[in-house]
Image: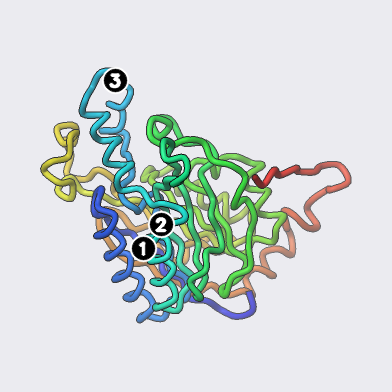
């Protein structure tokens, strides 16, 4: 990072299983954030076009429940093809707004469409895809929706706002995956999630203190009323809030710059000052003076 950067961490509901409408919402919120001065805009895990919250996705384990098969079909139908025209459309949103844009999607490979992936995409301000990372290990019930990812995207990359990379939700508990980011010069750590628990906030503090990077963690937020009446598993939704959020932005010291935001949509903003990176790495740099490459080495298979 060469100069301070304003970041917008967006906590917003998906338009459930409606890819086009969710991309429209992505465009509107990105433009709003850019108008407020943001140069980096980050959206939650699986923002396109729904996160499989455990209170209803657990029914996927039922072998003969037709509602589960129908719901999985909705995931597949609303997934983002990579490559594909909707990917280009999101790139154009970044270009139009002049921002670096990160968003979580359910991905479908057009050549092998039978398996879906939980993916993190980062676009530069020129609309080009900089990071394409598939979540390595879907967590618990998520394995009934998404397949396991691969080594692509396990590096920080240069962007207009600094060296940026990220991991999705609980794969942030994988020490070697984190270190793959650290040793590639990470400065802005993206940690999109659907974990709205209090313990996740402790995780974010640790990520910031361990990485000595800025941490941006938008959290999935969803209300019962935002699901269409035709949703096959609607009877499983017994609470008004399905996902209460908890989005936050943290400094390399582990202190909060914004958030956590709960129980509502909103856009958190903060200015990331690169001076803090140098100050906090004086005593601890996980891939520099506090690393022993003569004793420890990580082999990342990128494909």
What distance separates the C-alpha of mark 2 from that of mark 3?
31 Å
Q: Residue furthest front?
A: 111
Which quadrant of the structure image shows residue 262?
Answer: bottom left
Q: Which residue is mark 2?
A: 218
> What residue sits 42% from the left and 40% below the top?
113
Q: Which residue is mark 1?
A: 10
* Residue 193 numbered mark, or none: none
* Residue 62 numbered mark, or none: 3
Element at label 1: strand
What distance separates the C-alpha of mark 2 from that of mark 1?
6 Å
Where is residue 177 drawn, in percent x and y? 63, 44
Element at label 2: loop
> What residue sits 54% from the left and 51% below the top?
133
Q: Are marks 1 and 3 in contact (CB under 8 Å)?
A: no
Element at label 3: loop
Q: How many numbered dots are placed on residues in this image?
A: 3
Q: Residues within 10 Å of mark 3 (few under 14, many from 20)?
A: few
> Which tag, 2 or 1, sits closer to the chain's start?
1
Query: Does residue 303 lie above or below 160 as drawn?
Result: above
Where is residue 272 drawn, in percent x and y? 53, 72
Which quadrant of the structure image shows residue 89?
Answer: bottom left
Is 218 left or right of 188, judged from the image as shown? left
- Scheme of image coloration: rainbow
What distance separates the C-alpha of mark 1 from that of mark 3?
34 Å
> Which tag, 1 or 3, sits closer to the chain's start?
1
Q: Are marks 2 and 1 in contact (CB under 8 Å)?
A: yes
């Amino acid at each position: 990072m060469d100069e301070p950067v304003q970041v917008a961490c967006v906590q917003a509901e998906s338009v459930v299983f409606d890819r086009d409408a969710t991309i429209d919402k992505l465009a509107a919120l990105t433009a709003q954030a850019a108008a407020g001065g943001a140069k980096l805009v980050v959206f939650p895990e699986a923002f396109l076009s729904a996160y499989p919250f455990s209170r209803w996705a657990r029914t996927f384990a039922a072998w003969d429940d037709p509602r589960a098969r129908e719901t999985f079909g909705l995931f597949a139908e609303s997934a983002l093809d990579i490559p594909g025209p909707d990917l280009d459309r999101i790139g154009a949103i970044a270009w139009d707004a002049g921002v670096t844009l990160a968003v979580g999607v359910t991905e479908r490979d057009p050549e092998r469409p039978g398996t879906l992936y939980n993916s993190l995409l980062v676009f530069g301000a020129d609309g080009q895809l900089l990071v394409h990372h598939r979540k390595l290990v879907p967590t618990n019930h998520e394995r009934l929706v998404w397949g396991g990812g691969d080594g692509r995207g396990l590096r920080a990359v240069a962007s207009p706002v600094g060296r940026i990379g990220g991991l999705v939700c609980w794969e942030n508990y994988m020490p070697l995956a984190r270190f793959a980011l650290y040793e590639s010069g990470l400065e802005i750590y993206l940690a999109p999630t659907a974990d709205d628990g209090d313990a996740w906030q402790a995780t974010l503090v640790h990520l910031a203190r361990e990485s000595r990077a800025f941490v941006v963690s938008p959290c999935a937020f969803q209300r019962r009323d935002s699901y269409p009446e035709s949703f096959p598993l609607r009877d499983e939704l017994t609470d008004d809030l399905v996902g209460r959020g908890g989005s936050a932005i943290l400094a390399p010291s582990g202190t909060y710059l914004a958030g956590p935001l709960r129980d509502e949509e909103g856009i958190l903003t903060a200015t990331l000052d690169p001076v803090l990176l140098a100050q906090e790495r004086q005593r601890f740099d996980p891939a520099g003076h506090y690393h022993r490459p003569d004793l420890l080495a990580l082999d990342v298979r990128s494909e």
